[in-house]
Image (cartoon, rainbow, N blue to C red):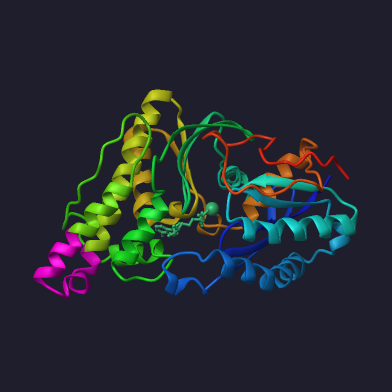
Amino acid sequence: MLINILGIESSCDDTSAAIITNNQIRANIIANQDVHRNFGGVVPELASRAHQQNIIPVIDQALKHANIDKKHLHAVAFTRGPGLLGSLLVGVSFAKAFAFALGIPIIAVDHMQAHILAHFIQNDAGDKPMPEFPFLCLTVSGGHTQIVLVKDYFEMQVIGQTIDDAAGEAFDKAARILGLPYPGGPLIDLHAKKGNPKAFVFARPQVAGLDFSFSGLKTSFLYFLRDRLRESPAFDTDHMDDLCASIQQAIINALMEKLLMAVKQTGVKDIAIAGGVSANSCLREAMMQMQETTGCRVFIPLLQYSTDNAAMIAIAGYFKYLRNDFGKFSDIPYSRAGNGTIPQTQFPGTLPLGSL
Ligand code: KG4
Ligand code: ZN
């Protein structure tokens, strides 16, 4: 049987809609928000307004691109959290109203689980290799940095995570210090391609076990640059490429060190990366090297499934649909994940309103 699901992602600053038929994507439309560029980060209220503006055109475009009539949809999957509450509310409210009008079920999806499940999106030829359970996934985004032991589609355990800033946040903050617009991660990646990653060394705090810390690195980068700018006011623009390459290398080294430790500790042989920072070219290269040195199988998502997208929400929705794991019209979004473990089917924050 062919199952058609509409996926909606609105957790942060991208409004996205995707149509999936079973595990193959037929449309994945993303409207990026430019309004945050000059603010150094996402401005929550501007993000909510832009989602309001974009959501219906984006969904309309996804349906047209997939060449599917809305009456042939079987369910609407949406990001329930974590993310910005005002942004989430736009997607959640739209999903509920649309599904209610069509008389089809809703499916609540966890954003971080969805980043990982994007690895199970099949390609058009139907021959994409997929990770086998259990596998490890380094999930690195603007708000999260986690090493996740993935035991099954919805059975995931966080075995390491950041104790302060996320890796994407470290990229964005370093970029901001260098005067680059938001989001700075992709710009650092671009400059780094022309720079020397060994040009500068920044102090990096060591954290026990599989956890990470990035706020100390940001501070040492800030102080390093402040001191150099005192001596030479154009130091940052003169050395932009080397600075980007060196800070990028420091972030990627911190990630790879802990991932390698996790591989050794768990003995798991399939290793994946997911989330916005998995688009980083230096991280992708480091993963390919790891495949050679450890003999593990490495899984790197396509670029369009690395940063926020609704295709990942749609594939997570498909697996939940197969399990009859549907949401309630009384479900509300949540801004933060629970206690460090990726929530499974029940999330905190549901009001006891009963189901419609
Ligand atoms: O997963 P994502 O799109 O949104 C969140 O869930 O947060 O991740 C966004 C993060 C941002 O911090 C952005 O700077 C970073 O991913 N990012 C990158 C690259 N592309 C996106 N960081 C480094 N290199 C990249 N090429
Ligand atoms: Zn994300």
Q: Nearer the viewer, residue 269 or 246?
A: 246
**Residue 346 location, x and y as percent?**
70, 35
Please tell me which residue is depicted at 31% across the width and 30% down the height of the picture: 208
Of residues 75 and 227, the one nearer the viewer is: 227
Residue 19 seen by the camera:
no
The image position of residue 343, as x and y in percent, is 61, 36
Task: Please give the name of the residue rendered at 54% of the width and 28% of the height, measured from the top-left corner.
Answer: 134
**Residue 196 found in image quarter:** bottom left
Taking the magenta stretch, the answer to whether it contains residue 120 is no
- Choose top left, top right, bottom left or bottom right for residue 85: bottom right
Q: Is 355 left or right of 95, judged from the image as shown?
A: right
Q: Is residue 239 left or right of residue 35?
A: left
List the single residue furthest toward the left.
231
Residue 190 at what x, y percent from top left?
A: 34, 66
Residue 189 location in percent, x, y?
35, 62
Q: Quadrant of residue 57?
A: bottom right
- In the rendered structure, which segment of residues is drawn in magenta? 224-242
Residue drawn 72% across and 66% down? 62
User: Residue at 41% of width from left, 48% of height from top?
Assistant: 166
Residue 229, magenta (yes or no): yes
Q: Is residue 172 visible?
A: yes
Q: Is the C terminus in the top left, top right, bottom left or bottom right quadrant?
A: top right
Examine the residues drawn in magenta and state their main secondary structure: helix
The N terminus: image quadrant: top right
Mark count: 0
Q: Residue furthest front?
A: 352
